[in-house]
Amino acid sequence: MPDPTIREAGRADAGAIAALILPVFRAGDTYAIDPAITAEAAVEYWLSPDKTTFMAELGGMVMGTYYLRPNQGGGGAHVCNCGYITAPDARGKGIARAMLAHSLDQGRARGYRAMQYNFVVSTNTRAIETWDRAGFETVGRLPAAFHHPTEGYVDALVMFRSLV
Amino acid sequence: MPDPTIREAGRADAGAIAALILPVFRAGDTYAIDPAITAEAAVEYWLSPDKTTFMAELGGMVMGTYYLRPNQGGGGAHVCNCGYITAPDARGKGIARAMLAHSLDQGRARGYRAMQYNFVVSTNTRAIETWDRAGFETVGRLPAAFHHPTEGYVDALVMFRSLV
């Protein structure tokens, strides 16, 4: 299986980003974002100035996108945060794993000392297993902090990995 | 000791808010906010549209301020988040305790099911003890996630309290 190409995103990727992220936000079962968010607001969020956003492509087709940003300001700015979205028809092609590896490299290259996911919905077991395998630890559990569209109130996890 | 009066803040409170929050942000030892933030940006942050901001007064003098906001959007919007700042010369006058009680009442009144503090610097023992006593649990520990100006890298805590 060929590796995807991962490059920085720009304004010209707005349409591809919207196509990737809107179905995920609309589903409302993994991201704590209003499912009714407009396409414009969703793209603004994904490309906001505090983030560096990337596109993953395979054979010239966009297969995924992720962002990297400082998780906090001031004394917390040495920890980064990422969000990843893979196209549904790109599952099993190594896109998520490639974006994760790329983000860990990028985090280190930019001088971050750790990476934190603030709000991992506990029913998102596929993502949790991927991050477990990549060395992330569950450092927090937020009881019933997420209202899942079909599962009701479920926990959210805080996951953390040192980069040094 | 008389109870402070707590009321909603408005744009007219910008000066009083700046006087309260800037020294805390400049000190850089409790909030994960750039200590070099401008006064304008700090006030914008404290009064941002996603927040409801309050002023605590005693004998007509401003003694503290706090904000309440949804901690996440979408499926996470039933958990609120607060930030509190008490004037240094108002310590021991019950201001922090009164703002905390007010915020728990406000959280409940607005239909939130829980309150979460995302990033409590572990050296801020005074605040942690206050929140422990008020029924908050430490549900997460972020290793070395805060660079303290004098203590170096220290942990940050995630604290959580049900409101139902």
Image (spheres, coloured by chain):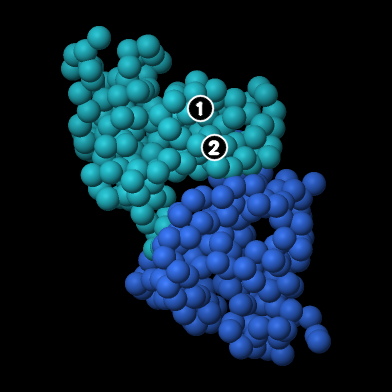
Chain colours: A blue, B cyan
Amino acid identity at mark 2? Thr
Circle 2 — which element?
Answer: strand
Find residue B128 and name its label.
1
Circle 1 — which element?
Answer: helix
Find residue B55 and name its label.
none
Query: Callout 1: few (<14), some (14-19), or many (20+) C-alpha neighbours within 10 Å?
Result: some
Q: Is label 1 or label 2 in front?
A: 2
Q: Which residue is mark 2?
A: B138
Residue B92's spot in the image, x, y percent?
Answer: 37, 11
Amino acid identity at mark 1? Ile
B151 versus B110 height, above or below:
above
Quadrant (top left, top right, bottom left, bottom right) of the N terminus of chain B: top left
Q: Residue furthest top?
A: B1
Q: Which residue occupies 35% across, 23% down?
A: B97
- Front-lying residue, B36 or B56: B56
* Residues at discs 1 and 2 both on one chain: yes
Examine the rendering and report whether any part of residue A150 can be seen: yes
Residue B4's spot in the image, x, y percent?
Answer: 23, 20
Disc 1 to disc 2: CB gap under 8 Å: yes
Instruction: Output the chain of dot 1.
Output: B
Instruction: Output the chain of dot 2.
Output: B
Distance of label 1 from label 2 (alpha carbons): 9 Å
Q: How many marks?
A: 2
Q: Which residue occupies 79% across, 81% down?
A: A3
Label located before the other in sequence (1 or 2): 1
Q: Which residue occupies 39% across, 39% down?
A: B82
Residue A51 is left or right of residue B130, and the answer is: right
- Front-lying residue, A106 or B82: B82
Q: In the figure, residue A78 lies in which quadrant? A: top right
B21 versus A44 height, above or below:
above
